[in-house]
Image (cartoon, rainbow, N blue to C red):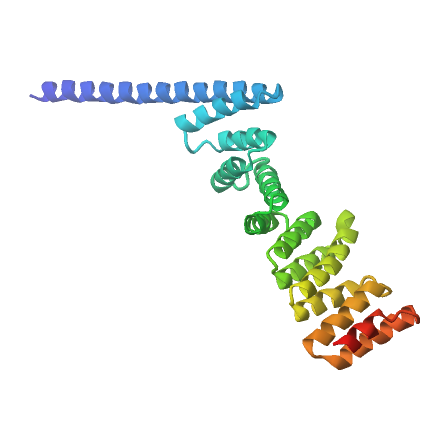
């Protein structure tokens, strides 16, 4: 009886060992397939054959849905095609799987920025805001993004959020976008006045005048905004600033006398 159990135990041990070896071989085979597909996809990407490259990376994802490198390279291929929505989806998945993976944040950020810019260009302001806000969590000091999210807020007529975005961009230094950020403060003030948002117009124009205290047009619009908001005293103060800059300028005074 003992010898029979010993033989059975030996047989079971051999079966377990064989099963383990087969599983290891299968794992090696799968990894070899993935490595081959990734190499082929990267070569196709380098040759600017983005659709074919994407097919390779998608196949890898089908074989191993946790393989973050495939999502990242899929995002690269989709960025190259200008397919922002799918690029963001794949970039976000790579970020979820490997937030500290090599090039994950830069590629994900590129997809978000491209998608936000495309949405802004095509008047999808709410989408643009959402994408740029997500981008700024990755790159909070990016002044171009602050400029664009501010423009998107203006598109939504959300003047307070626009002011906050432009001010944040300027607080970060402004960079090459500094003059654009300042100019958008003035544009936002004018838009707010035209929309009947006089208090928001005042706030935007006052912020603009911190950077360009000699701008006659800004003071004219500030005077009008104060007047329409019911603050006649500050309206007259703004008119005085206009006349200091140009004693012959009477537009603001005539505007008020007509009211």
Q: Is 182 on the left-hand or right-hand side of 22?
A: right
- Which image quarter: residue 100? top right
Q: Relative to 88, is 187 on the left or the right?
A: right
Q: Count the labels in the image.
A: 0
Of residues 123 and 68, the one drawn nearer to the viewer in this rendering: 123
Q: Dividing the image into 4 quarters, which one contains the N terminus?
A: top left
Which corner quadrant holds the C terminus? bottom right
Depth order, front residue of 50/61: 50
- Residue lying at the far front in this picture: please name it: 258
Question: In x, y percent, where is residue 255?
Answer: 79, 72
Q: Position of residue 240 (x, y in %)?
A: 86, 76
Give the residue displayed 24% in from the left and 18% down from the top: 14
Left of 228 or right of it: where is 237?
A: right
Residue sticking out furthest to the bottom: 233
Q: Quadrant of residue 116?
A: top right
Point out residue 183 in the picture as x, y percentages from the top left corner.
Answer: 77, 55
Q: Is residue 75 above or below residue 6?
A: below
Locate residue 219: give its quadrant: bottom right
Q: Residue furthest left?
A: 1
Question: Which residue is depicted at the point 17% across and 22% down?
Answer: 9
Q: Is residue 252 above or below residue 63?
A: below
Question: Could you tell me residue 247's position as x and y percent?
Answer: 93, 72
Q: Against 131, is 38 above or below?
A: above
Q: Residue at x 23, y 22 (%)?
A: 13
Q: Residue drawn at (62%, 54%), measured in percent from left and top? A: 155
221 or 51, which lies in front? 221
């Amino acid at each position: 009886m003992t010898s029979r159990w010993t033989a059975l135990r030996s047989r079971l041990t051999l079966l377990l060992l064989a099963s383990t070896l087969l599983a290891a071989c299968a794992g090696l085979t799968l990894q070899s397939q993935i490595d081959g597909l990734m190499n082929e996809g990267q070569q196709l990407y380098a040759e600017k054959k983005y659709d074919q490259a994407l097919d390779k990376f998608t196949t890898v994802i089908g074989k191993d849905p946790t393989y973050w490198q495939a999502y990242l390279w899929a995002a690269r291929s989709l960025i190259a095609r200008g397919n922002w929505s799918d690029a963001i989806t794949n970039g976000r998945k790579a970020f979820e799987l490997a937030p500290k993976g090599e090039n994950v944040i830069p590629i994900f950020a590129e997809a978000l920025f491209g998608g936000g810019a495309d949405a802004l260009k095509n008047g999808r302001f709410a989408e643009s805001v959402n994408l740029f806000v997500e981008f700024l969590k990755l790159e909070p000091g990016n002044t171009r993004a602050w400029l664009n999210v501010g423009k998107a807020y203006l598109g939504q007529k959300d003047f307070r959020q626009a002011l906050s975005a432009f001010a944040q961009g300027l607080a970060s230094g402004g960079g090459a976008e500094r003059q654009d950020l300042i100019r958008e403060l003035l544009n936002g003030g004018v838009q707010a006045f035209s929309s009947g948002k006089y208090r928001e117009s005042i706030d935007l124009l006052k912020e603009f005048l911190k950077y360009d205290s000699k701008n006659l047009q800004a003071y004219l619009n500030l005077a009008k905004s104060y007047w329409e908001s019911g603050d006649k005293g500050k309206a007259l103060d703004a008119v005085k600033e206009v006349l200091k800059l140009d004693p012959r300028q009477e537009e603001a005074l005539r505007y008020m006398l007509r009211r």
